[in-house]
Image (spheres, grey):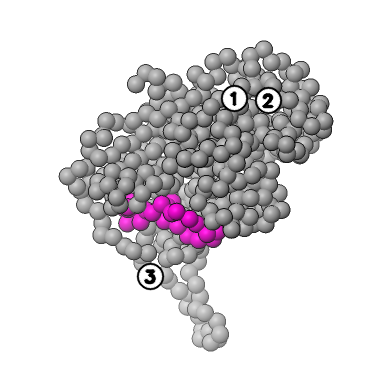
C-alpha cells in the first residue's frame, strides 16, 4: 500500500518493532521458523497503524430478503455464500458482533484488520487484548467490548414489520437488546428501488387484541398487520432513531444503521411482497416456553411508544452541522443523535472535505469509518471510494480509529477532484453534547 508523508498543518485548518522469534534447536528444513504470537502481531499492527486500523469489507446475507444491488458488490458475487444462505444485502462496519444467521460460520459479521495486504486478525480479537487502548477506558470498563456496530443494508423492497427486543427480554435468551438508528446516504440512493417508505409503529387506537388476531392469522396468508400501521416516505439525507420494542418495516433506501451490538429481532408480518415469513423468524429470540404464547408476543411491544400520535416528532432526524466551517472548506454534521430511554448509546457524523483541503478533526472517542464519496487520506491510510468490489477483495474505504488517535485529532486530506465524504459512528456516552431528537427544527 502506498505511503504518504505525515500531513502537516495547512492554511485552511489546524492541521514497529521487528517481530521476536522463539529460539529453537535447528528446525527441520521443511518447517518455517516459529511465528510471532497472535498477541505480538496485534500489538505490532496497532503500533504501526498510528491508531488508524484498516478494515476489510464484511459482507452479510439475509435469506428472507432480496438484495438491492447498490452496495458496489460485483453482480456475480451477490450469492457468493450460496443461494441457500441468501443474497448479500448488508455490509457491516467495525463490527465485533457476529451475525445471527442460520448456517453462518462463527466469524460472519466480524470485521477483520488488514495489514500488508492481508487479513490478520479480527477487530474483536484486538479489542479483547488491547481494549482500553482501542476503545477507551470508560467503554472498556463498562462493557469489556466494543458494544456497537454499524452497517449498510440494501434491499429491493421492504423488510417485514418487526421489532428488536429490549435488554430484559433479550436476556431471557442470553442476548442483549437492540436499539438502532437510520441515515440514508445520498451517494448510495440515486435509485430508490421498489418501496422507499417505512412503516413505523401502530396507528393510535390500535388494541393489543387487534395485533393478537394478526398473529392468529399467520398461516392464512397476509396477516394484515400493516393495516394498523402508517408508512412514512423516506428522504435521502435524513434519518430516524428507533428504540427497542417498536415495530418498523424499513423501506428500500440504502440505509446506514448505527446500532447496539446485537442481532436479535422478531418479525410480526407473515408475508411481505408475496413471500412467506416463517414463524421461526417471529420467535427466534423468544424463550421456548413462549413460542406459541400470543399474549407474550404482543406484550413484547412497547405499546405506548408504538401508538404514539406524534411518532415522527419523537424519532425523525435531520443533519445538524457541528459548527460553521464551510468557509474553511469542510463541514461536519451530526446525522445520528438522540437518547434511548435517557441514554446516549451511539451517535454518528458525516464529514465532507472539499477538494484540495486538509483538516484535522478531533473527536471524543473511537469510531468506525466508511467512505462514501471521493478519495484522499486519513493520516497515513489511503481513502478511496470503490466503484465495484469483488467478494473477498480488500478495499481502501474503511478504517477503525482508536480512542487516543481520535482525541488527538486525525488529518483528513482530500487529494481528489470531488468532495471526500465519510460516515463515522461512535460508542456509548462518547458525545454528551450531541443534539437531541427534534433539535433540527430549532437551528
* Label located before the other in sequence (1 or 3): 3
Mainly helix, strand or loop, the magenta region?
Answer: loop
Residue 128 seen in the current view: no
Front residue of 27 and 118: 118
Q: Which class describes the residues within 10 Å of circle 2: few (<14), some (14-19), or many (20+)?
A: many
> Which element is circle 1 on?
strand
For the residues labelled 2 and 3, the Cα–Cα distance comes to 61 Å
414 with respect to 201 (left or right): left
Question: For mark 2, what is the residue?
Answer: 226
Residue at 69% of width from left, 36% of height from top?
273
Residue tagged 1? 231
Magenta span has 165?
no
Mark 1 or 2 closer to N-term?
Answer: 2
Q: CA distance from mark 1 to mark 2?
A: 9 Å
User: In the rendered image of this protein, does residue 249 appear above or below residue 190?
Assistant: above
Residue 52 image point, x, y percent: 38, 53
Q: Position of residue 437 (x, y in %)?
A: 45, 23
From this viewpoint, which residue is outermost toward the left?
11
Of residue 175 and residue 350, the one placed in the foreground of this image is: 350
Res 202 visible: yes
What residue did someone put label 3 on?
18
Amino acid at each position: 500500500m502506498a505511503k504518504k508523508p505525515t500531513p502537516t498543518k495547512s492554511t485552511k485548518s489546524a492541521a514497529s518493532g521487528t517481530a521476536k522469534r522463539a529460539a529453537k534447536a535447528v528446525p527441520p528444513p521443511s518447517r518455517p521458523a516459529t511465528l510471532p504470537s497472535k498477541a505480538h502481531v496485534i500489538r505490532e499492527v496497532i503500533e504501526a497503524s498510528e491508531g488508524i486500523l484498516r478494515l476489510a469489507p464484511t459482507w452479510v446475507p439475509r435469506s428472507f430478503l432480496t438484495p438491492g444491488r447498490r452496495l458496489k458488490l460485483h453482480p456475480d458475487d451477490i450469492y457468493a455464500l450460496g443461494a441457500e444462505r441468501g443474497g448479500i444485502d448488508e455490509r457491516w462496519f467495525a463490527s465485533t458482533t457476529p451475525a445471527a444467521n442460520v448456517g453462518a460460520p462463527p466469524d460472519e459479521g466480524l470485521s477483520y484488520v488488514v495489514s500488508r495486504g492481508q487479513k490478520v486478525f479480527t477487530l474483536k480479537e484486538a479489542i479483547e487484548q488491547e481494549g482500553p487502548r482501542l476503545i477507551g477506558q470508560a467503554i472498556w470498563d463498562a462493557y469489556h467490548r466494543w458494544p456497537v456496530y454499524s452497517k449498510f443494508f440494501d434491499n429491493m423492497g421492504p423488510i417485514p414489520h418487526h421489532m428488536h427486543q429490549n435488554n430484559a427480554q433479550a436476556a431471557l435468551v442470553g442476548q442483549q437488546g437492540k436499539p438502532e438508528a437510520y441515515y440514508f446516504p445520498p451517494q448510495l440512493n440515486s435509485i430508490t428501488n421498489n418501496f422507499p417508505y417505512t412503516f413505523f409503529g401502530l396507528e393510535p387506537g390500535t388494541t393489543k387484541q387487534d395485533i393478537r388476531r394478526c398473529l392468529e392469522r399467520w398461516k392464512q396468508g397476509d396477516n394484515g398487520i400493516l393495516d394498523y400501521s402508517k408508512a412514512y416516505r423516506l428522504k435521502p439525507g435524513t434519518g430516524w432513531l428507533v428504540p427497542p420494542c417498536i415495530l418498523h418495516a424499513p423501506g428500500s433506501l440504502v440505509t446506514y444503521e448505527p446500532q447496539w451490538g446485537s442481532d436479535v429481532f422478531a418479525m410480526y408480518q407473515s408475508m411481505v411482497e408475496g413471500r412467506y415469513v416463517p414463524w421461526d423468524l417471529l420467535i427466534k429470540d423468544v424463550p421456548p416456553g413462549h413460542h406459541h404464547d400470543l399474549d407474550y408476543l404482543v406484550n413484547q411491544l412497547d405499546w405506548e411508544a408504538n401508538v404514539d400520535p406524534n411518532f415522527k416528532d419523537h424519532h425523525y432526524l435531520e443533519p445538524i452541522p457541528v459548527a460553521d466551517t464551510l468557509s474553511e472548506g469542510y463541514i461536519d454534521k451530526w446525522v445520528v443523535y438522540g437518547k434511548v430511554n435517557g441514554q446516549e448509546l451511539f451517535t454518528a457524523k458525516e464529514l465532507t472535505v472539499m477538494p484540495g483541503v486538509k483538516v484535522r478533526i478531533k473527536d471524543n472517542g473511537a469510531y468506525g469509518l466508511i467512505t462514501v464519496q471521493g478519495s484522499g487520506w486519513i493520516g497515513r491510510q489511503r481513502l478511496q471510494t470503490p466503484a465495484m468490489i469483488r467478494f473477498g477483495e480488500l478495499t481502501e474505504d474503511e478504517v477503525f480509529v482508536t480512542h487516543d488517535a481520535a482525541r488527538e485529532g486525525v488529518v483528513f486530506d482530500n487529494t481528489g477532484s470531488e468532495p471526500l465524504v465519510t460516515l463515522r459512528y461512535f460508542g456509548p456516552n462518547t458525545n454528551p453534547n450531541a443534539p437531541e431528537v427534534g433539535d433540527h427544527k430549532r437551528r
